[in-house]
Image: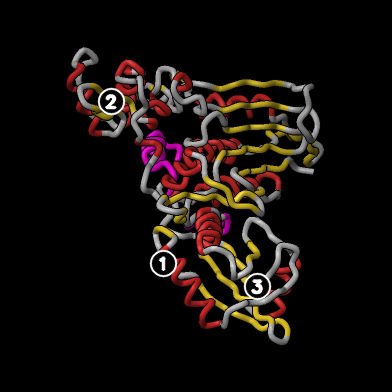
Amino acid sequence: MNRTELLELIAGLESSRVEFKRDDCHPEDIAKEMSALLNLEGGFILLGVEKDGLISGLTRSREESEEWVMNIARQNVEPAVVPVWTSIEMEVGKIVAIIELAADSPGKPHKARRGKAWITFTRVGSTSRESTREEEGRLYQASKLVRYEIKAVPDTGLGSLDTIRIQNYFRDVLKRQTPALSETDSWLQLLENSDLLFKSRDRYEASAAGLLLFGDNPNRRLPQAGVTAAAFPETKKDYNMIDEERIRGPLTPILSRRGGVQEKGVIGRTVDFVRRNMGSIAWLESGRRRRKRAFPLDAVREAIVNAVVHRDYAREGTDIEVSLYGDRLEIISPGRLPNGVTVAKMKEGVVRVARNELLKEILRDYGYIEHQGMGVRNRIIESMIRHNNTEPDLIEENDRFVVRLWKAQ
């Protein structure tokens, strides 16, 4: 970072990625800011800058300040980190130090020492606060220390799953020999081996993935398992809706032995909602009137599948939102992109990771997901360009991911 870049950073004042600090503060204050920035998306702590952006400079020498910061990063942050250190003389005798913290730390959640305790902090706007239990759980999930989808859900069991649907999956989708539905012990073993059930002491409990994919009533224990769909006549949300539906139930369909759909799951029902509300476009070609759907169904289906596979299910009480407007379709998935995934990588088709690997693998068995990981590029971007020469918006903002498909103008 050079002097001009630092001045621009200071002029922007504090933000979710920038913190101003005096270097005579308590080490615990620096550790708190390190923890919070690392747990969001990294950033900068500027030592020697006041809260209003006034440059006051370091009170120690550069060498003493650097050693002080590195000791804090090693002794007061867990897991310990090694930030990038830079110092720049802004005015005669006024030096500003830049502590740069990585955007994709594999050690999340980072904790900061407070007395004898270790506390996880989260960055919210320009302030750092103690993380809630839910926020800390999402950080563990983001670091892949905990996978929410294979977490056992209390007060559930084999009876919480739709056994007809499960038998259909193993027998008709995977083409495997399956035990009779009356052979409970055999099914318990099969489902435990498949991470759809977990044995806890003397009883079995369904995993979150088991409920999401095959649950008899997933929302009874996972209220966030569903889609809220709405169609609006204009270009913004309004009470005057054309259609709305809260789509609940298992994600998977029931298929015939020949692959035909006998009963749709949440994915198929959501696609149907979009199909019946998207409308069509018409044009004249060689004197004849032509008509086609406003969006290609393969792009719609891929966007919906991505939303249910990649959403953050640790965020309770928040549905996937599917909204149709006069000029576009928006699909909003709760949660930021998983570690290492960027919009640029998605557009290039080089993403091979998923937040919910078990969901991804089982939905792949149903043919919803491409093996090469090229779905966004092939089924959404290129499909929309072929259909109406528009390019979709893929946007990560706050704690959600938005896919926006545009109608032809």
Residue where numbered disc 3 is placed: 48
Is the residue 135 above or below the residue 153 in the image? below
Residue at the location (47% across, 38% down)? 133
Residue where numbered disc 1 is placed: 74
**What amino acid is at disc 1?**
Arg
Sequence-first disc among 2 and 3:
3
Crowd band around label 3 with a 10 angstrom C-alpha radius: few (<14), some (14–19), many (20+) = many
Verify whether residue 355 appears in magenta.
yes
Magenta span: 343-369
Label 1, label 3: how many angstroms apart (C-alpha)?
21 Å
Rendered-image quadrant of the N terminus? bottom right
Name the mark on residue 171. 2
**What amino acid is at disc 2?**
Arg
Verify whether residue 72 appears in magenta.
no
**What amino acid is at disc 3?**
Gly
Label 1, label 2: how many angstroms apart (C-alpha)?
54 Å
Rendered-image quadrant of the C terminus? top right
Judged by depth in the image, the label closer to the viewer, 2 or 3, is 3
